[in-house]
Amino acid sequence: MTARVEHLVTSGTFSLDGQTFDVDNNVWIIGDDEEVIVVDAPHDADAIAEAVGDRTVVAIACTHAHDDHVRYAPELGERLSAQVLLHPEDRVLWDLTHARHEPDGTLREGQVLEVAGTRLHVLHTPGHASNHLCYLLEEERTLFTGDHVMQGSTVVINPPDGDMAVYLLSLNELLNEPLDWLAPGHGFLVAQPHAVLRALIAHRGKREAKVLAALHSHGPGPLEGLVKAVYADVPPVLHGVAQRSLWAHLLKLQGEGRAVLDADDRWAAASVA
Ligand SMILES: [Zn+2]
């Protein structure tokens, strides 16, 4: 029997920097009637345990340790007698939710998990979280993207853990992978992955151009002032979140020598020598 992909949606909350949001998370279950790998452990341990049934769980593979992806990982690990696996350096995030439980093992770029006669490749895709992982099911040309790519919304890049420059590099690297489908942590399956990835990269490029234009027209200025100019197309209620992304763009431009931060926390375009 070849492996199949099952899916359930769980509902709960996601907390970031003291704010809490309602959110639906996907759980992806890859395997056959005998054994499975579970990707992420959000919101509802009972529902996930019921979906797994009496099958052997080879691993609970976490994409990253934001609380909406790992909330029930230790409990499920115990209930399902399964190893919880995570990038070792994602412990910084993990400890915010599970200071008293350690993950059972680590996963790094290039490792391969085997389940039900098929292979799941581990890809390191930093950016949304500094040690985010995606999982490629070679046989189905399907990539489990966690929050590296979401369906229906833009991924939050929240410095200092999130990093826009490496996020764009990670998106670009996925263009080299053989992909028919993206299976995100939030939302529906995504077809035409390469076209979607190119569109995401272009979207970030356009936003970066707006950031540079705002630095020239409004700079030097503080983040709070620049956000209105750069995100005029986004409702003001979202400007708090947008400000995190703006900061991520500015840090990328600073790293490239195209933006500078002065002693009064005001951003400006770097003067051309
Ligand atoms: Zn996340």
Image: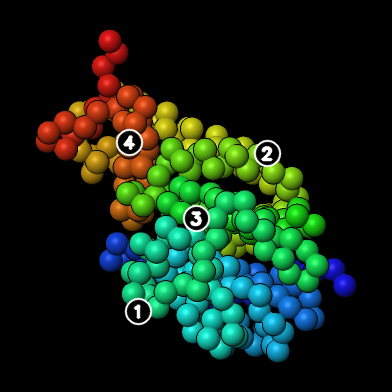
| Label 4, label 1: how far apart the Cα atoms are | 36 Å
Pinpoint residue 227: horizontal percent, then vertical percent: 30, 41
Of discs 2 and 4, which sits in the foreground?
2
Q: Earlier in the sequence, mark 3 or mark 1?
A: 1
Q: Relative to residue 261, is residue 241 depicted above or below?
A: below
Horizontal side of residue 215 vs 221, given as left or right: right
Q: In the drawing, what numbered circle is on residue 176?
A: 2
The disc at residue 250 is 4
Query: Could you tell which of marks 4 and 1 lies nearer the N-terminus?
Result: 1
In the image, farthest residue toward the right: 1
Secondary structure under the numbered disc 2 in the rendered image = loop
Name the residue at 37% across, 27% down. 256
- Say what amino acid the circle numbered 4 marks: Leu
| Quadrant that contains the N terminus | bottom right
Query: Residue 52: x, y in percent?
Result: 67, 83
Residue that extends furthest to the top in the rendered view of this protein = 273
In-front residue for pair 76/244: 76
Q: Secondary structure at mark 1?
A: loop
In contact (CB < 8 Å): disc 2 and disc 4: no
Whether ligand 1 has any atom under 8 Å from the Cβ at mark 3 is answered as: yes
Q: Which residue is mark 1?
A: 100
Local crowd at mark 1 within 10 Å, few (<14), some, or many (≥20)?
A: few
The amino acid type, in three-letter code, at marker 2 is: Asn
Q: Which residue is mark 3?
A: 132
Side of 229 where 198 appears, left or right: right
